[in-house]
Amino acid sequence: MNPGKRYLRNTVFALWGVAASFVGLNRLYAAVGTEAPEWRRSLLSLGLREDRQPEPKPELDLATAKDFSKVGVHGDFALEIVGAAQYKVEFVPPAGTASKFHAYQENGYLRVNTDDDVTGGTLHIEMPTLERIDANVPRITVQGVTAKELKLYGYRDGVVTLQNNRVDSWHLSSGDALDVRMDDATFAAGSIKSNGNVVIRRAP
């Protein structure tokens, strides 16, 4: 047998061996199950298989929310943010209904979203420091906030009302139609940069 054919034969045999070993290890891993020690399951998996599902984030009681400087929201409700010395967060549901929302904190964000069947309601936030808003809600109000820079990213058609803010630099961005209404005090306090489909109006 010439060297070329011998090399090809050996390569095929080697691949068969690897495939058989992988199948055998996976069967052994399944037989061990989740009750085996973590080190044994990790060793048998060879880092190629993870049998556990990611744990869901724990639900947050809004009354305990604090130490965040960014807000991310999603749903058919209004967002109100007010500059204040202390944190205070509450969700006011539509009249005659119970609150249906999900909240958690991560990476400096307070994130709140509502179930698909919830229409209306208001998320009211009082906070001392605000750096960024990521909003997929139809109505946003920001009032009495003091900051060097504030970024607002919109992800749906909506109306933003800015009142009595002292922000040195605004960055407003939205791929959908975002109607921003700004009062004289907010307008005079700093510069404004916008990207995408953002229309800025002076509030009456």
Image (spheres, rainbow, N blue to C red):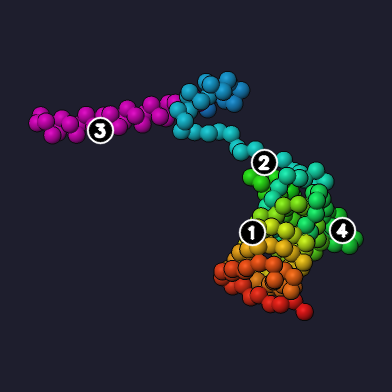
Q: Is residue 131 left or right of residue 14?
A: right
Seen from the viewer's position, the closer of residues 60 and 182 is: 182
Point 87% across, 58% down: residue: 97
The answer to whether the residue labelled 4 contacts the one labelled 3, judged by CB atoms less than 8 Å apart, is: no
**Mark number for residue 12?**
3
Residue 87 lies, in percent from the top left, at: 80, 49
Q: Where, quadrant-wise, is the N terminus in this rendering? A: top left
Of callouts 2 and 1, the N-terminal one: 2
Which residue range is magenta in the image?
1-29
* Element type at mark 3: helix
Give the labeled residue for mark 1.
Answer: 149
Point 63% across, 63% down: residue: 169
* Element type at mark 4: loop
Point 83% across, 46% down: residue: 63
Give the labeled residue for mark 4.
Answer: 97
Callout 4, which amino acid?
Thr
Residue 66 lies, in percent from the top left, at: 76, 45
Point 65% across, 58% down: residue: 148
Residue 81 lies, in percent from the top left, at: 76, 59
Seen from the viewer's position, the closer of residues 41 and 171 is: 171
Can you tell which quarter of the image residue 192 is in?
bottom right
Can you tell which quarter of the image residue 9 is in?
top left
The answer to whether the residue labelled 2 contacts the one labelled 1, judged by CB atoms less than 8 Å apart, is: no
Callout 3, which amino acid?
Val
Name the main secondary structure of what is drawn in magenta.
helix
Give the labeled residue for mark 2.
Answer: 56
Instruction: Give the spatial CA distance, label 2 vs label 3.
Output: 44 Å
Instruction: Give the spatial CA distance, label 4 vs label 3.
Output: 67 Å
